[in-house]
Amino acid sequence: METFTPYSALAGGALIGLAAALLLLFHGRIAGISGILGEALRGGARESGSFRIAFLVGLGAAALALRLVHPAAFAGADSLGGAVPIAVVAGAGLLVGYGTRLGNGCTSGHGVCGVSRLSKRSIVATMTFMATGALTTFVVRHLLGVGR
């Protein structure tokens, strides 16, 4: 945790909240990334406008802009400090996205939009996936010894 910076974390959280609020304000949609990506991949962007494609392009463009403006933010991103290959991290992210779509939910939709509305369902869902993530990390790192 030596690289944690509360100001950049606060700024990142504020930008995520702002993006979610703007999407809700202008399109009446919840910013659930797995849902947006899933619908865009199955052709849902044509059915309800191009906001999904624009949102996804914006996510990628923001990461690219940060990389260009502040490359140090990506230091160690190739292997997360040498502990876990980036391909494993990407695969894990895809599995999480697939699982949330399979369960008709979305971590960002519940965790950002639902919790901010004090939705009991979203609070329980967020607590569930956070606990599952913590348990998985404990098992993989401490019981299986991967990524030490």
Image (spheres, grey):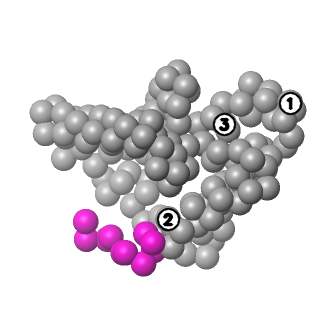
Rendered residue at 31%/53% (across/down): 82
Q: Which residue was labeled with disc 1?
A: 47
Is residue 5 rendered magenta in the image?
yes
Please identify the quarter of the rendering in which residue 88 is found. Answer: top left
Q: Which mark is residue 37?
A: 3
Rendered residue at 65%/45% (across/down): 30
Please identify the quarter of the rendering in which residue 4 is found. Answer: bottom left
Label 2, label 1: how far apart the Cα atoms are: 30 Å
Circle count: 3
* Residue 64 visible in the picture: no
Q: Which residue was labeled with disc 2?
A: 13
Rendered residue at 78%/49% (across/down): 27
In the picture provided, is 123 more to the left or to the right than 134?
Answer: right
Mark 3 nearby-residue class (10 Å; few <14, some 14–19, many ≥20): some
Q: Secondary structure at mark 2?
A: helix
Amino acid type for the residue under numbered disc 1: Glu
Percent of width and height locating residue 43: 80, 27
Percent of width and height locating residue 57: 73, 51
Mark 1 nearby-residue class (10 Å; few <14, some 14–19, many ≥20): few
Label 1, label 3: how far apart the Cα atoms are: 14 Å
Vertical arrangement, residue 18 with respect to residue 105, above or below:
below
